Image (cartoon, rainbow, N blue to C red):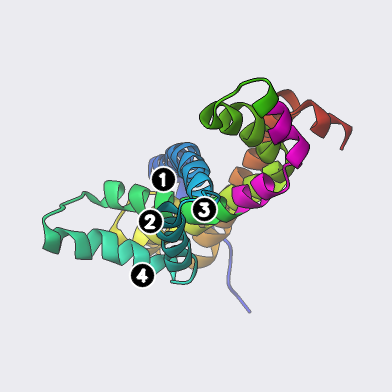
Amino acid sequence: MDYQLQFAELLPYTNELLHGFWTTIWLMLVTTLLGCLLGILGAAARSSRQALPRAVAGMYVELFRNTPFIVQLFFVFFGLPALGFKLSAIEAGLLALIINLGAYSTEIIRAGIQATPSGQLEAARTLGLSKFQTFFRVVIPQALERIYPALSSQCIIVMLGSAVVSQISVEELTFAANFIQSRNFRSFEVYLVTALMYLLLAIGMRQLFRLAGYYAFPRLRRN
């Protein structure tokens, strides 16, 4: 094998790589925030005693957990415009990521809600808290603490899967890598650097989640 590595040929494309890197970070900041919020609302609906919100949330979860993300992405980007909803590439990619994370986080958070001791709910009723107050002041904080490691791992998985949005020309990290490779044909170097950048992102997200959990959930400090 006489292939010679030439990483120097990537230097003219540093701006493209950095732009893709920061776009991926921005996508995941928004996706994590809104996707987890959607998951809380979905978990509340799934845990409801009323049949309609429970059924709607159940269909949403089953639909988006049992179909490929790329199909969901194409439906949002190519399908919705047929109904009059025109979205830019980055808007469509962001919407698909949020909905996808919301579906998975719904089930993760619901598991935490179901693990809430009944005594906590009785105590809340004794204190005169409404159902809304009980859910957001008693149930959700404890549920998030229980499922925080699983939820943070799911966010990282979605970040890694966000590479798919390059298929609709969202200029994130994988899009930048494909663009550079099409120009200099240094596939090994380009995708090796890209893989290392995703690794850096995953490790960075894990550390940030760990730090946030350390301050938000005191009991996690003992783990």
Amino acid found under the numbered disc labelled 3: Arg
Q: Tag 2, which secondary structure?
A: helix
Residue 178 drawn at (x, y percent): 39, 61
Query: Looking at the image, is 160 positioned above or below residue 125?
Result: below
- Give the residue displayed 46% in from the left and 45% down from the top: 11
- In this view, the residue in front, 112 or 165, is 112
- How far apart in space, not on screen, are marks 3 and 4 (Cα)? 25 Å
Earlier in the chain: of badge 2 and badge 1, it is 1
Amino acid found under the numbered disc labelled 2: Phe
44 left or right, relative to 140: left
For the record, the magenta segment spans: 108-124
Residue hosting label 4: 71
- How far apart in space, not on screen, are marks 2 and 1 (Cα)? 7 Å
Earlier in the chain: of badge 2 and badge 4, it is 4
Residue hosting label 1: 20
Q: Which SS type dominates the magenta stretch?
A: helix
